[in-house]
């Protein structure tokens, strides 16, 4: 919200919801990119030295790519996942603003119901309702495109 107010205050009011959505999407992508890079290239120093110094320990074993990393997937699955994310992002743009906001806060930002309610300025029940409606609407939109999650 601060970026929107600081950089785009001169824009017409009709453009602000779209600008806010783009800023939010970029912030989410930046967060996950930073998280991926940090988890890939950083290793705690303590993990470089084994718990038992008597045993043979190879520090390079700790630098292997995590099994849940996207790099362990075959390229075809990586492309399929990227296409699925693009379809979900496109479907998100079709949701009403409050449902989209609740869905992104709860599931993409991984916030709790109380925290999302505080940010949205509504009750926890409203957040739950908006999230439920958003997930059902997204499921219907994706089913129409032949995707079952």
Image (cartoon, rainbow, N blue to C red):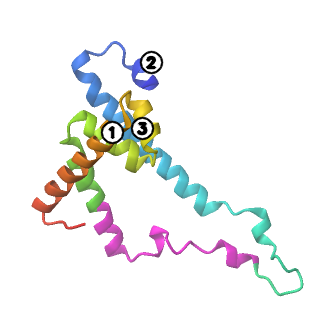
The outermost residue toward the top is: 10
Determine whether 8 is above or below 141 in the image. above
- The reply to whether the magenta stretch includes residue 77 is yes
Give the alpha-carbon distance from disc 1 to disc 2, as whole Å.
Answer: 32 Å
Locate residue 2, reporting x and y percent: 46, 23
> Mark 1 vs mark 3: which is more N-terminal?
3
**Residue 101 seen in this snapshot:** no
The answer to whether marks 2 and 3 mark residues whose Cβ atoms lie closer than 8 Å is no
Q: Which residue is mark 2?
A: 6
Most extreme residue toward the left, as rendered?
144
Residue found 82% across the figure and 76% down from its top: 51
- Give the mark toward the camera: 1 or 3: 1
First to last magenta residue range? 59-82
Quadrant where the N terminus is found in the figure: top left
What kind of element bears circle 3? helix
Please report whichever mark, 2 or 3, sits nearer to the chain's N-terminal start.
Answer: 2
Q: In this figure, which residue is indicated by the disc labeled 3?
A: 116
Q: Position of residue 95 (x, y in %)?
A: 20, 41
Q: Position of residue 131 (x, y in %)?
A: 29, 45
Q: Which mark is residue 125?
A: 1
């Amino acid at each position: 919200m601060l970026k929107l107010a600081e950089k785009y205050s001169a824009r017409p009011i009709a453009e602000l919801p779209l600008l806010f959505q783009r800023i939010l999407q970029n912030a989410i992508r930046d967060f996950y990119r930073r998280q991926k890079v940090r988890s890939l290239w950083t290793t705690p120093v303590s993990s470089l030295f084994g718990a038992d110094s008597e045993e043979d320990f190879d520090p390079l074993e700790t630098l292997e790519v995590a099994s849940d990393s996207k790099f362990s997937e075959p390229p075809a699955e990586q492309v399929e996942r990227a296409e699925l994310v693009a379809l979900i992002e496109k479907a998100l743009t079709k949701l009403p603003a409050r449902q989209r906001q609740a869905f992104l806060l709860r599931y993409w930002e991984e916030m709790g119901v109380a925290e999302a309610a505080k940010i949205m300025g509504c009750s926890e029940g409203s957040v739950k309702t908006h999230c439920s409606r958003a997930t059902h609407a997204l499921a219907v939109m994706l089913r129409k495109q032949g995707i079952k999650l």
